[in-house]
Every structure is written in structure tokens, then in C-alpha cells.
């Protein structure tokens, strides 16, 4: 099959599919219509699949007629709690919900990949699994899919995922070797002091004052405890305490996020946050408890798989359209869970159009995408998956 011609043949259908998903976005763990529509297309095309994976996800499998390894690709399917402010005719009809991160495009691309691979299944050596994954934006649906066993039977050896990116024009792609995205840890700090009337501060242990010194002290973690060559972000996003302006409260609660690239640095930073917080509180007569919630692990690409993607992209696009990212992003993506169990790679697919002014960032109410990126995404994912089946 001439894959490029076949992608051109189904391109208008994939645009219609993307626009349908864009009009009907659903939040994480609520992707019921999205899941139903994915299954309708898979049923129409005779593609084997399992519904209800991680509650609202779908896993499709194309079984080649010849023996071989199993490779996979991930498409996240959830939307964001954002009110869309574009003027496109297929804008969201679900109030306060928008596909502002391009997951509608990811889904359409991978439905196209599944359709084409099904049509050439007799030529495939091995199997391809397509993971239509829920809840990337919240609880990490990738982890649930893995825990439910969908990387097994047959076992997936290599995984691919892409993400649309509006700072790249449609027709451009961006790869990175090694570390791509940060690990995340949410944390809370509970500071316990002693309440009193504001007129008698000597009778209190003021948790607000203590919180102020803890906030200041924590700034030294990144600036003085960690090498400037090692990327770490510490952000306190919430602080709550007090009930009245003339009462010193007994408690303050703060919360924030820690982003790290290196696993050892992640452990060090967590321990140091505890030490700084607990000892600063103690110095002011208060007590503090720090609790961490494990988020997503760091996303680290396999260099051999990036090589496959690079070579495939250069065969589809001109070399000047193939970019390389110098530094990792401190953002996170739960595709990292898949890469703990498989060799794989994650890359950026250009969807912007500078000439039309479509450069608003992802997670923006004005996010727009040039749908030409769908064609590039289907071509690159399909050909790279076939290369992975043949090469390793």
C-alpha cells in the first residue's frame, strides 16, 4: 500500500472525526461519549478492541498475520475545564469544557493509524496496540491501563506518543533525546500553632508568621541546595489560614508542586523540603507536617526509538522541518508510566500557523490548530510503528 496516498484518501474523514470530538469535549474520567464514538469507528472498520479500560479508555489491537513483536501508540482523549473563546464553527458545545490541549487531534490521528494498519494487517509481522487513554490531565489514566494489564498478552515492547504544539507550524516536528518531561509531586504543609486574640500576640504561636518564614526559607532549596545545571521547580500555589482579622489562627495549610528531572534529585528535594519546613516551624514554636503525593515520573525517551522517529520524519518531511529540543520541559505527561515498562519516545507535532495567527499555547481558551498536522501525525506514527516492528 502507498501509505501517503491512503492517508490523503482518508484525510477529510479524519478532519470530520476531529471536529466531532472537538465539539463534544469531556473532562477526565467522564469521556463516555468519546469512548463510544471511538468504538463506533473501530467496529465500522472491523478492528478488535476492548472498551472500559481504566473506566473510559479503549485499547485497539491489530494482529499481523505473521509472528513478531508488539508495539504500541498512545492517544490521550480527555479535555480541560476551559471555556472556549474561538470563533470556529465546530467550537465546544459543552459549556466550560474545551479540547484546549489538542487531545481531539491525538484521537483522530490514532484512529487513522488504526484504520490504515488494519488495512495492511496481512503484511504486518507482529501486532500493534493503540491506547485511547483517559484522564491524562488529572489522575494518570496511563497508570490504570498498565495496572489492568493492557501492556501484556501480547507484551508491548515499544511505545510511541505525540503531542500537538502550536509554537511549531504544522509540517514541523520536534524530538528530544533522553529526558523530556519532569516528574511531579504535589505536597501539602500543615502548620500548627496556638490561637489567640490579635491584641495579645504574646499568648499565641502565630502560624501565619511561621508560614511566611517557611515560604522564604523554601526558596533556598532551588537557589542554594541544587546545582543551577539541574532543573527543579518548587511552587507554592495555595495558602489558607485564619477566620477573622483580629484573631491569630491556630493553623495554616499550604500546598504546592515540586517538579524534578533527575530521580535522585527528586528524593533529595523532598527530604530537604521536610527538613526546612519542620525546623523553621520549630524555630518559631510551631509544628509542621509535610505530606507528598506521588505524581507522574519523569518522561525519558529511548534514544534508539528517537532515531527511528528522526529517520522516519526526515523521509516524510524536509530536514529543516525536523527540530530538536535542547532542554527538557518542566511540564509533565503520564505517558512516562508507559516508558517505565517499555522502550519508547514522545515528541511534539507542530499544529500552529503563524500566518493565520494560530499560535495561542495549549491550555489556552484561544487554542487553535492547523488540521494539516493530522496528516503528518498519521503518516509519522504509522510508518514509525512499522519501522519498529521491522528493525529491532
Image (cartoon, helix red, strand yellow):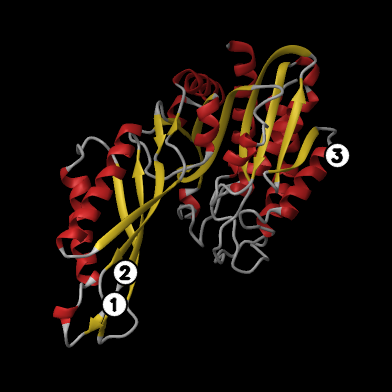
Task: Give the side of residue 88 with respect to residue 276, left or right.
Answer: right
In terms of depth relative to the viewer, which is nearer, 267 or 194? 194
* Place of residue 199 in the rendered image (x, y in percent of width and height, measured from the top left): 17, 88
Callout 2 crowding tier (Cα within 10 Å): few <14, some 14–19, many ≥20:
many
User: In percent of the image, x 68 and y 59: which residue is there?
Assistant: 23
Q: Quadrant of residue 207?
A: bottom left
User: In percent of the image, x 59 and y 65: which residue is there?
Assistant: 87
Q: Which residue is mark 1?
A: 249
In terms of depth relative to the viewer, which is nearer, 283 or 330? 283
Cβ atoms at labels 2 and 1 below 8 Å apart? yes
Q: Quadrant of residue 224?
A: top left
Is residue 238 depicted above or below 148 in this figure? Answer: below
Q: Which residue is mark 3?
A: 44
Q: Which residue is mark 2?
A: 252
Is residue 309 depicted above or below 359 in this figure? Answer: above
Q: Earlier in the sequence, mark 3 or mark 2?
A: 3
Amino acid at each position: 500500500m502507498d501509505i501517503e496516498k491512503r492517508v490523503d484518501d482518508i484525510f477529510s474523514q479524519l478532519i470530520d472525526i476531529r471536529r466531532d470530538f472537538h465539539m463534544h469535549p469531556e473532562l477526565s474520567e467522564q469521556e463516555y461519549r468519546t469512548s463510544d464514538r471511538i468504538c463506533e469507528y473501530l467496529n465500522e472498520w472491523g478492528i478488535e478492541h476492548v472498551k472500559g479500560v481504566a473506566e473510559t479508555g479503549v485499547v485497539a489491537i491489530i494482529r499481523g498475520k505473521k509472528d513478531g513483536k508488539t508495539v504500541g501508540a498512545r492517544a490521550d482523549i480527555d479535555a480541560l475545564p476551559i471555556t472556549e473563546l474561538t470563533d470556529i464553527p465546530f467550537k465546544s458545545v459543552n459549556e466550560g469544557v474545551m479540547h484546549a490541549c489538542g487531545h481531539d487531534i491525538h484521537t483522530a490521528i490514532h484512529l487513522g493509524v488504526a484504520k490504515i494498519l488494519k488495512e495492511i494487517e496481512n503484511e504486518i509481522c507482529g501486532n500493534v496496540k493503540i491506547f485511547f487513554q483517559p484522564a491524562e490531565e488529572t489522575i494518570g489514566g496511563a497508570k490504570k491501563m498498565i495496572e489492568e494489564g493492557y501492556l501484556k498478552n501480547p507484551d508491548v515492547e515499544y511505545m510511541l506518543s505525540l503531542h500537538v504544539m502550536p509554537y511549531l507550524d504544522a509540517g514541523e516536528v520536534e524530538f528530544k533525546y533522553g529526558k523530556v518531561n519532569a516528574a511531579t509531586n504535589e505536597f501539602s504543609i500543615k502548620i500548627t500553632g496556638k490561637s489567640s486574640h490579635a491584641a495579645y500576640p504574646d499568648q499565641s504561636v502565630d502560624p501565619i508568621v511561621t508560614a511566611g518564614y517557611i515560604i522564604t526559607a523554601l526558596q533556598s532549596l532551588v537557589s542554594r541546595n541544587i546545582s543551577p545545571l539541574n532543573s527543579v521547580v518548587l511552587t507554592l500555589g495555595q495558602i489558607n489560614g485564619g477566620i477573622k482579622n483580629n484573631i491569630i489562627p491556630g493553623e495554616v495549610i499550604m500546598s504546592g508542586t515540586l517538579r524534578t528531572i533527575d530521580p535522585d534529585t527528586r528524593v533529595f528535594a523532598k527530604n530537604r523540603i521536610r527538613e526546612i519546613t519542620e525546623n523553621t516551624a520549630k524555630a518559631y514554636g510551631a509544628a509542621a507536617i509535610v505530606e507528598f503525593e506521588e505524581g507522574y515520573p519523569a518522561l525519558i525517551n529511548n534514544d534508539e526509538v528517537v532515531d527511528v522517529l528522526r529517520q522516519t520524519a526526515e523521509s516524510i518531511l524536509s530536514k529543516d522541518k525536523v527540530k530538536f529540543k535542547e532542554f527538557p520541559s518542566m511540564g509533565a505527561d503520564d505517558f512516562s508510566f508507559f516508558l517505565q515498562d517499555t522502550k519508547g519516545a514522545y515528541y511534539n507535532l507542530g499544529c500552529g500557523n503563524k500566518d493565520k495567527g494560530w499560535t495561542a499555547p495549549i491550555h489556552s481558551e484561544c487554542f487553535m490548530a492547523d488540521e494539516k498536522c493530522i496528516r503528518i501525525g498519521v503518516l509519522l506514527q504509522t510508518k514509525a510503528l512499522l519501522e519498529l516492528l521491522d528493525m529491532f
